[in-house]
Image (cartoon, grey):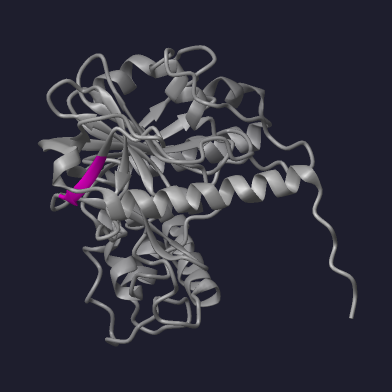
Amino acid sequence: MGKHRKLNKGQLRRMRANQQKRLQQVELTQEVDDASLGAAESGVIVSRFGQHAIVAAETSHTHFRCHIRRSIESLVCGDEVVWRRFTSQTEGGEQGVIEAVQERKSLLSRPDYYDGVKPVAANIDQIFIISSVLPAFSTQIIDRYLVACEDIDITPVIVLNKADLLSEQPDAIQAEIEQALAMYEAIGYQVVRTSAKTQGGLETIQKLLQDHVSIVVGQSGVGKSSLVNALLPEIDADVGAISTNSGLGQHTTTVATRYALPQGGFLIDSPGIREFALWHLDENRVAWCFIDFRPFLGRCKFRDCKHQPQDPGCALQEAAETGELHPLRLYNFHKIIESMASTKPSRAMPRGSKK
């Protein structure tokens, strides 16, 4: 049997510090009682970090670092909560305890292969889908987010960021992007072209944000944090560069964070992801969430039609052939269905699905 590797002083110090934090956490959970807490207050979650969260008080909008009761099964940015302040200072620096979560008006979630369906943000009414010229413009990613928006009935806005770089691209790429944006506009979606660098389109974004609770979503590297910085320069969100090796964006924002807007409303900056999965949805639900499919759904010759080119009497295929439906949307639909089958975990309810 091999010898155990001896820990150095730094490793021992970190291990003891982590153990002490865990002990303090248990003690806090066990010792908090009504005698050490003030009256119940309303607040909103600004961001969450493990068993702690930043709460914005409803009356003053001041931020407080709070412990989360173990009885709370799920808590995310944007949740409306009931919390109570500590009447005296705690050793861990906590300023209060979150007691309960109010019923959510809406919830954006994303499936994770290992952690199940993970909630991202609550009580939002508008989603800004950020795409960009670089690292790569992708209608498949946009369509995945559009399906998510339609599934929870939240208004989407498609944003082409780094629009100032479009003129530097080859003619074929410029035409491809412009045609795709025109396709979404023809379907009925709002499209905005922006540039955090030149400030172009920011005034339009600011008007759309006013008096709404909005979230920005998109792949890593599309410039979400740069755009948030341009809209709210005082927050100084982390900005990452494009990887020169992979051409993919680097993750910068690590947790969803909610910011108050000077013109009214709130903006949530969410972590960037490489791919937005949809395996938690039924295939028929995905088809319904393609809003341009709806006039043709139920009109296929066979009820179990998969809408493939070889399927006889498929209303969607016929619509694509006659120009009533854009072929790219049908292509993206099939790519989503294929990915759902290949990426869905084998277990029905993965661990951590109630985070």
Residue 51 visible? The answer is yes
Residue 139 visible? The answer is no
Quarter of the image with the C terminus is: bottom left
The answer to whether 65 appears left or right of 310 in the picture is: left
Location of residue 290 with respect to 64 vertically, above or below: below
Residue at image position (43%, 64%) is 333
The answer to whether 164 appears left or right of 89 in the picture is: right
Residue at image position (21%, 52%) is 153
The answer to whether 7 appears left or right of 196 in the picture is: right
The answer to whether residue 339 is magenta is: no
Residue 1, x across and y down, in percent: 89, 81
Residue 279, x across and y down, in percent: 43, 70
Residue at image position (51%, 40%) is 254
Considering depth in this image, is 199 or 183 the residue closer to the camera? 199
Residue at image position (29%, 26%) is 63
Residue 97, x across and y down, in percent: 25, 42
The answer to whether residue 100 is magenta is: yes
**What segment is highlighted magenta in the picture?**
97-101
Residue 240, quarter of picture: top right
**Dominant secondary structure, magenta:** strand
Considering depth in this image, is 218 or 100 the residue closer to the camera? 100
Considering depth in this image, is 45 or 66 the residue closer to the camera? 66
Residue 61, x across and y down, in percent: 21, 23
Return the residue found at the far left.
Answer: 39
Considering depth in this image, is 52 or 107 the residue closer to the camera? 52
Number of on-image labels: 0
Return the residue found at the far right.
Answer: 2
